[in-house]
């Protein structure tokens, strides 16, 4: 026997908040409903579905707008990072995402985290590099990173 439920919270491998799901009666009665993850699908719950989906859509749109604002700040940005070198070309260490974020903050560009920076390869030499910053799943921007030898 199965029962239809409205999910009140995201449940892994089942669905997201506001989804209607069909699950086994025991799973609903013993876990989902007592834990507050779901409630039985009724007329009131159906109205609540529409409200939850509208709220979720508004949150997604707000997050996308914020991501686009950060990407607009990153357009045509170039940062310079100075590093110690062995022979004028090869770096002692490497340039990492934390150093790129710090260089962006020096230019008063906030909203970029280390996890957003997608380095294709480790930067271990002096030169100019194109670095992609994935602000969110749908929005990314490429910046120019100049690595120069410390004087």
Image: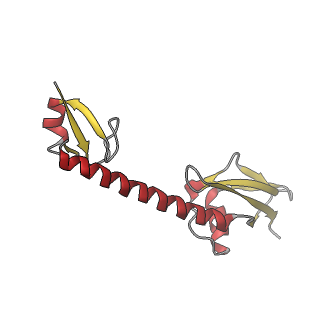
x%, y% of residue 10? 32, 46
User: Please, which residue is most extreme toward the right here?
Assistant: 88
Image quadrant assignment for residue 14: top left
Q: Residue at x 81, y 64 (%)?
A: 148
Asked if residue 36 shows in the view, the reply is no
Question: Looking at this view, is 106 or 41 the one in front?
Answer: 41
Q: Residue at x 59, y 61 (%)?
A: 68
Q: How many marks?
A: 0
Question: Looking at this view, is 99 or 70 the one in front?
Answer: 70
x%, y% of residue 49? 29, 49
Question: Looking at this view, is 65 or 33 the one in front?
Answer: 65
x%, y% of residue 45? 21, 48
Question: Looking at this view, is 36 or 79 the one in front?
Answer: 36
Q: Residue at x 35, y 35 (%)?
A: 13
Q: Does residue 135 appear left or right of residue 11 in this picture?
A: right
Query: Is residue 127 depicted above or below 79 in this figure?
Result: above
Q: Does residue 87 appear left or right of residue 67 in this picture?
A: right
Asked if residue 25 shows in the view, the reply is yes
In the rendered view of the protein, which quadrant contains the C terminus? Answer: bottom right
Image quadrant assignment for residue 112: bottom right
């Amino acid at each position: 026997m199965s029962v239809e439920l409205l999910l009140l919270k995201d449940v892994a491998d089942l669905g997201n908040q506001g989804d209607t799901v069909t699950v086994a009666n025991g799973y609903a009665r013993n876990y989902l409903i007592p834990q507050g993850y779901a409630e039985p699908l009724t007329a009131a719950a159906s109205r609540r579905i529409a409200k939850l989906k509208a709220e979720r859509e508004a949150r997604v749109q707000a997050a996308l707008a914020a991501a686009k604002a950060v990407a607009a700040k990153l357009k045509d940005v170039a940062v310079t990072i100075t590093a110690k070198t062995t022979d004028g070309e090869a770096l002692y260490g490497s340039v990492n995402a934390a150093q790129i974020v710090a260089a962006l903050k020096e230019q008063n560009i906030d909203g970029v985290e280390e996890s957003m920076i997608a380095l294709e390869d480790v930067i271990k030499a002096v030169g100019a590099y194109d670095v992609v910053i994935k602000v969110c799943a749908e929005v990314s921007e490429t910046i120019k990173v100049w690595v120069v030898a410390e004087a």
